[in-house]
Amino acid sequence: MRALFVVLLALPLFAGLKHLQLQEALALLEKNNLEIKAAKYEEAMKYYDHVAVKAKSFGSLDFTFMALRSNDAGNVFGFKMQSREASFADFGFDEFLAPMGQVLENMNAYPGHLPKGFTKGMGSILNIQPKKLNYPKARNHFAYKFTYKLPLYTGGMLSSYRAITKKMYEMSQLDTKKLLALKKFELKKTFYNIALVNNFIANLYKIRRNVATLKNVIKEMKKEGYALETDIMEVDAKLAEVDAMLDEAKLNKQLAYYYLSFLLNTKVDSIIPPRHMPKIPTATKEIIEAKSLDIAKAKLGLSISKDAVELAKAKFKPTVGAFAEYGFADKKIFPHQLKERDFYTVGVQLKWNLFNGGGDKAAYEKAKSKYLQVATQVELAKKGIWLKVQKLKAQIKSLQARVRSYEKQYKVAHRIYLTYRAKYKEGLVSITDLLIKQSNEVQVLMQLLKIKNERNEKILKLQEVLNS
């Protein structure tokens, strides 16, 4: 009993949306659709690419901490120099001064001329290898450095990169809008498909009732001897055919709901089908150029290729950067007498590539050619979109005429069926003739709904092109 109670409580968690309207679905689409969410994450990544390039204009500040220990003579002497602790004793002067004193005493003993062996004595002094300098004790060294680098002039390279990454971010926003327009098209199409399937199912039920009524009439006529057993068998076959069509229509409706649930990333149990056909948008060249996302993307691509030309041109110009470093070092991890241990370095660097075999020139010419190519593609996009719109408008006009034609044909086919049903009761036509007329009615109905679906699809496609 407790388990049953838990199941009943959980049922609402698995329930889907009911009586969903198209406008509500469009709002949910932008919020829930997984493809649109992924596109928005792509937008965010492009935005941070732009932020990263902007940050380069402010330079970089690095902190470096080094903890070292060495008995290498060069390192130890360098450590002492950096922490400003080097002394003459580090050069081994204590081993130098004693022999030097003996030479000076000899000079005092023989005033007026250089003593014998003086040169040799000096040579022996110069050959002394100080142990403190060559074999120092191992020493700890702790260094702290703050380094700041700032680009002062890049020939326009950074500004071009900033412009390109900003427009790439805008391009990703257009891609998201284009994807949203496509998903709206698919959502609307699914809604109108469900409406047409509902209409088809309702008509099939009506036809089935008519066939079932006809079967009852035939049974009564058979009792009177005016109908045959084969007439009943033909009607049963017709009922089976209608039932098969109903099962197929219901399956198509179920698949449409599955796809709708996929688009909205939410289970949908039922909708309120649109009552009217989709609205045909106004499409002039001015409106197309203002609203078409494809044209907007082409124009933005042209602007990016122009910035790419400026970027290629920047390689012919010098770059200038500033550099500043401040630090301190000591043999202790926590320095004492900081003012006596600190150091700084400042400088400016200019770098200018004077020759690279013509590679930069080739890159510049390629960028210019790309710009001209994209400019041509923009004009091609405008003309291509206009041609596509004209084609869609012509197809919509043709399909509307066919819809009107098949609506009339359906009414006529239905009247013919009713006429043949009356004639059958009077024995003027066979059951086969009657069922053929009913099959014609069903075929015309199916063709009518198919053309309505094609018309709706073309109208929705036109709305997608105009982002409306």
Image: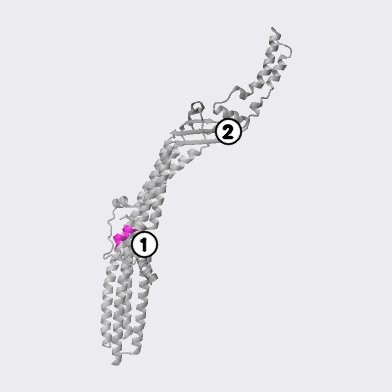
Residue at mark 2: 140
In-image side of 288 versus 105 (left or right): left
Q: Residue at x 25, y 78 (%)?
A: 415
Which residue occupies the extreme front position in the image? Answer: 2
Q: Quadrant of the N terminus?
A: bottom left
Specify which label sits upstream in the sequence, 2 or 1. 2
Q: Residue 14's image quarter?
A: bottom left
Q: Nearer the viewer, residue 278 or 138?
A: 138
Instruction: Name above or below for residue 370 compared with residue 429.
Output: above
On residue 266, which mark appears? 1
Query: What's the residue type where badge 1 is placed?
Result: Thr
Which of labels 2 and 1 is toward the front? 2
- For the stretch drawn in magenta, the main secondary structure is helix
- Residue 417 placement (x, y as % from top left): 28, 80
What whole-number distance in Å separates the C-alpha atoms at marks 2 and 1?
Answer: 65 Å
Locate residue 251: give its quadrant: bottom left
- Is residue 329 left or right of 128 when viewed as pictured? left
Q: Is residue 398 above or below residue 285?
A: below
Amino acid on which disc 2 is placed? Asn
Assign a secondary structure to mark 2. Answer: strand
In this view of the protein, which residue sits in the foreground, 343 or 320? 343
Q: In this orientation, does residue 361 appear?
A: yes
Relative image position of residue 400 (x, y in whole percent):
28, 65
For the record, the magenta segment spans 21-28
| Residue 181 in view here | no
Is residue 285 magenta-colored? no
Observer-nearest of 424 and 113: 113
